[in-house]
Image: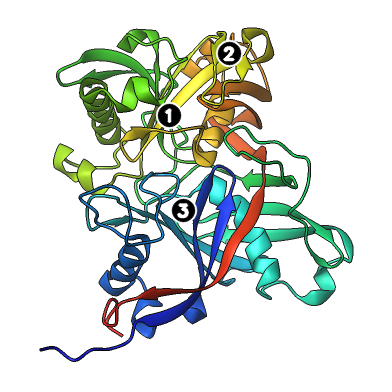
Amino acid sequence: MRPVRPQVRIPATYMRGGTSKGVFFRLADLPDAARVPGPSRDALLLRVIGSPDPYAKHTDGMGGATSSTSKCVIIGPATQAGHDVDYLYGQVSIDSAFVDWSGNCGNLSSAVGPFAIANGFIPADRVPQHGVCTVRIWQKNIGKTIVAHVPIANGEVQEDGDFELDGVTFPSAEIPLEFLDPVDEGDEGGAMFPTGNVVDTLDVPGVGSLQATMITAGIPTVFVRAADIGLTGAELQPAINESRERLALFEAIRTAGALRMGLIKSPEEAVKRQHTPKVAFVAAPADYIASSGKAVKAADIDLVARALSMGKLHHAMMGTASVAIATAAAIPGTLVNEAAGGGAREAVSFGHPSGTMRVGAAAEQVDGQWVVRRALMSRSARVLMEGHVRVPAGTSGD
């Protein structure tokens, strides 16, 4: 009989950020073995979330068994000059023992500033009694700067407010976010359009040739026309997630795009890079009924967009994919710009499964290359619970 040891208690905060939620940790609070990248850290986060779970319920963990709720964040002191904190994001697979560190979560980015303020990462003299505290965040996954403008009331983060975000049930205080120089340079190259083209012909095994815009702003994303794959662009989750054929189609597109973008070297590598690239489909504005029952009017939006995350259609829109939409919409000739009606634009409103969203980006050409200095969007965030998470002893080598 093995010796019985009590579970390990780790300080943590459960937070909603945008249309996602995840478990937030301070780096210094993690067990020693999990303070550095590697198998021990991954094992800990998998156990916290409750993965891998063949039942796809996360009953024995903090996850919610969706790509939007199977997330962990590690916040530490800034390692880059001119920044306040380091932000590291882990997308935890639901059905396999895998944590994907290849990209950012734009939605949870909105919770990083509030967490940093509440946990003492920001000097007290920087936090006003009333007003806005600006937090400069170093996003370690992709090496980018995010600036969060966090509302403050009575010297503390203001969470209550009247800002409504489709995909989130209750209103909260608005947190504007700036994604500076949002092109994900990564290890594979630094071009916004890795192929050098705003539109390419993508050969997808089992599907055929599809036109695609492949962009790395916000997060590597492959955009295709909804009509080219037999869709309208106004689909809700069941239409995609309950169809094995359509899910297989999107995974084939994602794999072909990853290969063409140089993110993977063989199709087999796609299974180990589930978080990136994203695959999305777009179309011209259309009337439809959102998942909440809200009527979305074509006259109120510039285009419709849907995106898949971790193999399933997202219930709203990922924050990083929203940056990709904003950036691609600003550049003439992309499929996103085409769906929005073409021409120069610095902001678009798009329809997603839960409603609508407005995002902005300003693009310019420098020495023949497209450059985006910043992308803008607003989100909200809220602490759901704080205290300790518990994991069985030995989970991360403790």
| Residue 208 seen in this snapshot | yes
Q: How many marks?
A: 3
Going by the numbered disc 1, the residue's amino acid type is: Ala
Among numbered discs 1 and 3, the one appearing first in the sequence: 3
Precedes in sequence: disc 2 or disc 1: 1
Locate residue 55 relative to residue 375 in the image: left or right.
left
The residue located at (30%, 77%) in the rendering is 392
The spot of residue 141 in percent (x, y) is 45, 57
Which of the 4 image quarters holds residue 178? top right
The image quarter containing residue 37 is bottom left
Outermost residue on the right side: it is 130
Q: Does residue 367 show up?
A: no
| Quadrant, the C terminus | bottom left
Q: Amino acid at mark 3?
A: Ile
Q: Is residue 390 above or below residue 263?
A: below
Looking at this view, is 268 or 116 the one in front?
116
| 242 vs 365, nearest the viewer | 242
Mark before the other along the chain sequence, 3 or 2: 3
- In the picture of the structure, the residue carrying the numbered disc 1 is 307
